[in-house]
Image (cartoon, rainbow, N blue to C red):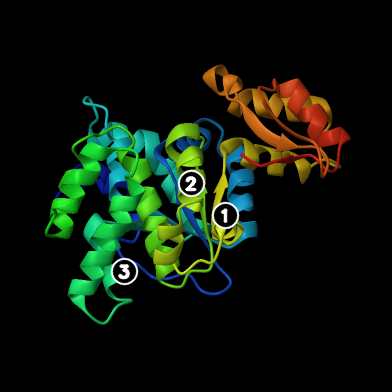
Amino acid sequence: MRELDDSLITSIDPYIEKRYIPPTPLQQACLFDTMILTRLAKVARDYPADFNHFIDELISLNAILYIPEIILEETAGNRGMTMELYRDLHQPMFRKLSEKIPVQVLSFEMIYDILAATMNHTDHAFLKFRLLNVHLNETNKTIQHAIEVAASPEEIFHALSQQKKDLGERILHLLAFVLLEDGVPDVRLFSDEEKGVYNVRRLLSADEKVLALLHIQNQPSFLKAYQLESFDCLLCSILSKRRDVWSEEDMITFLSKHRAGKHLHRKLRFSYSVRDVDYRQLDNQELVQLVCRNEEFRTTF
């Protein structure tokens, strides 16, 4: 079951651990999807001083970062990728992260092993693992049917890998569920994906069979245990903590470096009072004005 060409990522080996250590009660389990890792890598590479602000956000969470191998595979997915290019693109981020944040890379087999360790019988563990994957792929009948007849974790991975689109997101959802089963009280996934992450999480939260599998009583409890945060949420948290230090012009300059191009067209989910919620595009000036002039402003995704 090969998810990753290890030779490509040798440059980051000193900065990651290829094992699972559960978070302590004081640590926040965090997952990053491919786009979040790619955007953070660009910040670390092009604006190393600014990257410290993102590190501070993770430190404030007391984060421990879990990355499925498939996510690293996707960051190295360019056909022209070489060891040297991967080093140039990603080593600055992982080097800086590892100074303050534990970074653990997990294979699909390791994800299964986490679940298996919570159960007394191997057969029961596999049946539950397969069932979780069946429910996670409810909207993709081709994958779901292949999972239903799978007889091993490797066959489940093969079923999931039939379609590369959203593969990373599917495995991130699975990892979040397995961590919750391992007793982790809450998991936070960082992603900008509306369809493959936000919408899927909402569907899962309303699925009574999923809630029963995870021993979660109701939808609010599920949403509290499985949290989402977007890159814009990170940016807004950085800005709000610097209201008394940065001018609005400073904030706009900061955003112009890290929120440009296609990212400006992404719609934000946000609230600016207990009752008022919205979902629309905001340019950088509008976003700064909301952060600076309304203390109740919150980005939710």
Q: Residue 5: in sight, yes or no?
A: no
Cβ atoms at labels 3 and 2 below 8 Å apart: no
Foreground residue, 98 or 187?
Answer: 187
Give the amino acid at mark 3.
Answer: Ile
Q: Earlier in the sequence, mark 3 or mark 2?
A: 3
Residue for point 42% across, 71% down: 22
Cβ atoms at labels 1 and 3 below 8 Å apart: no
Give the amino acid at mark 2.
Answer: Arg
Crowd band around label 3 with a 10 angstrom C-alpha radius: few (<14), some (14–19), many (20+): some
Q: Residue 124: in sight, yes or no?
A: yes
Foreground residue, 191 or 53?
Answer: 191
Per the model, the C-alpha gap separating discs 1 and 2 is 8 Å
Q: Earlier in the sequence, mark 1 or mark 2?
A: 2
To which residue does mark 1 refer? Answer: 223
Per the model, the C-alpha gap separating discs 1 and 3 is 22 Å
Give the amino acid at mark 1.
Answer: Leu
Q: Examine the rendered structure and indicate whether residue 14 appears above or below residue 87.
A: below
Left or right placement of residue 293 versus residue 43 in this view: right
Q: Examine the rendered structure and indicate whether residue 219 appears above or below residue 139.
A: below
Mark drawn on residue 290: none
To which residue does mark 2 refer? Answer: 201
- Front of the two marks 3 and 2: 2
Cβ atoms at labels 1 and 2 below 8 Å apart: yes
- Picture coordinates of residue 81, whole percent (x, y): 24, 29
Check disc 3 and report its element: helix, strand or loop: helix
To which residue does mark 3 refer? Answer: 114
Check disc 1 and report its element: helix, strand or loop: helix
